Amino acid sequence: MTDPAHTEAALAVPVWDVAVRLVHWSLVPLIAFSWWSAENGEIEWHIRSGLTILFLLLFRILWGMFGSSTARFRSFVRGPGKVRAYLRDPSGWRGVGHTPLGAMSVVALLGLMLLQVGFGLPLSDEDGVVSGPLNRLVSFDTAEWARDVHEILFNLLLALIALHVAAIIFYRWKGRHLVGAMVTGRSKDYPAGTPGMIRVGAGRLALCLVIAAAVSLWIANGVPGL
């Protein structure tokens, strides 16, 4: 007799690779730590956390171009027509990975985090003792302006994160297990026979990691050569 639990597990569709999941779950504590370190005056740790987030974002962008099928932006970023069609009939969407609406959320979050980190790079603390790696490239007034934008963007990021969480709760109510799929990499929300994620070789992963690390270190060291 076939084990029902084994049969159910076999029907789970591979959706997210390890790289996507690690980036996703690493950003959660890093954003929380960045907020804590800023609120408590731990500017050196705040900068380190921001640079780590920068590395993850750069890697995710590269992985969105060269990674597994569901990680690639071209596989889930859709035009206005597709988004409107999805809003009219969500049940008609059969793609594996992000829905057209979910894709908008992902792109918005990645873009906003990248801007948040970018405006944080030229900042310094109130005494000018500890500064970001790009502080030397800007004037005092520009650094102060960047600080204001940095704070505004964080509030926008919090609002977008809250919206993202609300959407996850809504989809869970509708019967889709988005969190579980992002933990295990597999989902049972798709019909049997649905083609899953197409993986790529470890060489691409290594190359994306090396490039993201090299660019992050170059920025962390104050973009020498500029």
Image (cartoon, helix red, strand yellow):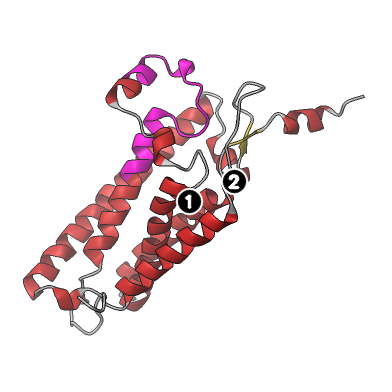
Magenta residues, dominant SS class: helix
* Residue at disc 1, secondary structure: helix
The one nearer the camera, 157 or 139, is: 139
Magenta stretch holds residue 104: yes
Residue 135's tag is none
Residue occupied by mark 1: 24
Q: Position of residue 53 (x, y in %)?
A: 39, 62
Residue 158 among magenta residues: no
Q: Quadrant of residue 164?
A: top left
Q: Amino acid at mark 2?
A: Val
Answer yes or no: is residue 32 visible: no
* Secondary structure at numbered mark 2: helix
Residue 96 in picture, x, y percent from top left: 53, 30
From this view, report whether residue 134 is shown above or below residue 25: below
What segment is highlighted magenta in the picture?
Answer: 84-108
Q: Which residue is the site of mark 2?
A: 183
Question: Given the image, on which type of amino acid does mark 1 rest?
Answer: His
Which residue is farthest bottom? 129
| Mark 2: few/some/many CA within 10 Å (<14, 14-19, 20+) | some
